[in-house]
Image (tube, rainbow, N blue to C red):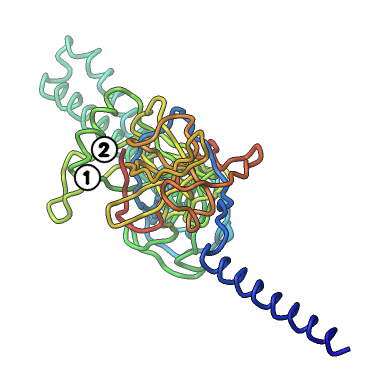
């Protein structure tokens, strides 16, 4: 019995010794090595726009402040504030009675002068018929001729007075000079308005609409060059819109002066706005597309990293080792970015998992699905004033 206990004690001691040796061996070998799991995307080549990004304001295509062309009291308003107006639509009525009375008086004077002219012509005809008989003197004949000439001038003056009275009567009925949207009325019925002084209403045409913005004088030569080639167009959206909702417009104006205070040049694009998506005075993001870069290399912007030496990406080589590759970046194109130097079409770049990757180390690649982050989205637009990018 004592021997059996001794054998068990010896066996237990041997196991403890072996366990300690195994533990020291494991500690000396360190933790097991493994390849980090990453996802990748392939660099692709396609044609992309070269553009400038600016902040601008939208403005009405036409804007008219309606003022009366005669004085008088407003007797009727024929529209609602904010209504869509058609050219020629009645807006206000000024009391027409004084101007109707002026027209009646002018017409009466015109009729009187015509009657006097008819009499003068009859007398002149009679004098001419007996002038050779010496029953009247030549002076009398000339006097009758003069009377006819004076009466003819008086008829013309009175006819002009009639036309002026008719025009004033027409001015009593104020119509919309353009198609557009009415603002808030500035006077109510009962107010007395003065000729060319009292503002009645602001009307603005919203379709199409302008987008006014600026470019720096440093960018002006390229803008002028592309304008001459006919390649310029603008993409305009409000800041709350996604990039794919930008609307294309035509560059219709480049100012002839560089502003001394800012060193910028005013430009204007005209955009369709049938649904009134844009509103006058609203801030807009403007992407001025200058040209098209052929075969640019793009990768998802998510793949880029920044170090003290500049931007870089991890390139996964054929043997599944990761290479730290410095790159030169161009313009953003939606969720992608142009790589102008350092990367070739078709190379694989690490999309996620960069923090666990060691330069030159092995990686375990998890291939992405059909969507690898590269799309044909239009260029992203900055929301910060003055931000612009050029490749």
Q: Nearer the viewer, residue 369 or 141?
A: 369
Residue drawn at x 52%, y 40% as measured from the top left = 320
Residue drawn at x 59%, y 51% as measured from the top left = 37
Q: Is residue 73 left or right of residue 129?
A: right
Where in the figure is residue 30, as x and y percent of width and height? 52, 64
Q: Quadrant of residue 101?
A: bottom left
Q: Quadrant of residue 4?
A: bottom right
Q: Say which element carries label 1.
A: strand
On residue 172, which mark appears?
none
Q: Residues within 10 Å of mark 1 (few under 14, many from 20)?
A: many
Image position of 72 with respect to 224: above or below? below
On residue 265, which mark appears?
1
Q: Is residue 35 left or right of residue 265?
A: right
> Is residue 254 something one can see in this rendering?
yes
Quadrant in which the C terminus appears: top left
Residue drawn at x 18%, y 11% as measured from the top left = 133
Q: Nearer the viewer, residue 30 or 242?
A: 30
Image position of 213 with respect to 18: above or below? above
Quadrant in which the N terminus appears: bottom right
Marked residue nearer the N-terminal end (2 or 1) = 2
Q: Nearer the viewer, residue 220 or 191?
A: 220
Where in the figure is residue 76, as x and y percent of width and height? 55, 61
> Is residue 170 something one can see in this rendering?
no
**What count of labels does the image hold?**
2
Where in the figure is residue 52, as x and y percent of width and height? 33, 42
Residue that carries the numbered disc 2 in the rendered image:
254
The answer for how far apart the CA atoms under marks 2 and 1 are is: 7 Å
Do the CB atoms of the residues marked 2 and 1 lie less than 8 Å apart?
Answer: yes
């Amino acid at each position: 019995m004592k021997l059996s206990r001794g054998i068990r004690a010896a066996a237990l001691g041997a196991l403890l010794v072996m366990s300690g040796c195994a533990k020291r061996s494991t500690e000396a070998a360190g933790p097991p090595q493994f390849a980090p799991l990453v996802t990748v995307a392939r660099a692709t080549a396609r044609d992309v726009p070269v553009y400038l990004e600016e902040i601008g304001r939208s403005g009405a295509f036409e804007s008219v402040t309606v003022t009366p062309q005669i004085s008088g009291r407003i007797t009727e308003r024929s529209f609602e504030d904010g209504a869509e107006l058609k050219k020629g639509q009645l807006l206000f009525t000024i009391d027409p009675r004084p101007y109707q009375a002026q027209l009646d008086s002018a017409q009466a004077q015109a009729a009187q002068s015509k009657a006097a002219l008819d009499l003068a012509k009859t007398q002149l005809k009679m004098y001419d018929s007996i002038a050779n008989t010496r029953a009247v003197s030549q002076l009398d004949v000339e006097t009758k001729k003069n009377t006819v000439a004076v009466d003819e001038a008086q008829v013309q003056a009175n006819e002009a007075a009639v036309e002026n009275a008719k025009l004033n009567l027409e001015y009593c009925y104020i119509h919309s000079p353009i198609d557009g949207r009415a603002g808030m009325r500035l006077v109510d019925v009962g107010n007395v308005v003065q000729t060319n002084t009292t503002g009645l209403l602001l009307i603005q045409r919203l379709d199409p609409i302008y987008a006014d913005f600026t470019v720096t004088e440093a960018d002006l030569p390229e803008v002028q060059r592309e304008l001459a080639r006919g390649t310029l167009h603008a993409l305009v959206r409000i800041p709350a819109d996604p990039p794919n909702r930008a609307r294309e417009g035509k560059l219709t104006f480049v100012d002839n002066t560089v502003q001394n205070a800012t060193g910028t040049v005013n430009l204007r694009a005209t955009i369709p706005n049938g649904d009134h998506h844009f509103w006058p005075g609203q801030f807009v993001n403007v992407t001025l597309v200058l040209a098209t870069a052929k075969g640019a290399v793009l990768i998802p912007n998510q793949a880029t990293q920044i170090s003290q030496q500049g931007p870089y990406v991890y390139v996964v080589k054929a043997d599944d080792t990761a290479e730290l590759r410095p790159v030169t970046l161009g313009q953003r194109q939606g969720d992608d970015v142009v790589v102008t130097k350092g990367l070739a079409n078709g190379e694989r770049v690490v999309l996620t998992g960069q923090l666990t990757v060691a330069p030159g180390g092995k990686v375990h690649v998890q291939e992405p699905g059909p969507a690898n982050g590269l799309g044909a989205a239009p260029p992203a637009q900055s929301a910060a004033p003055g931000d612009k990018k050029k490749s």
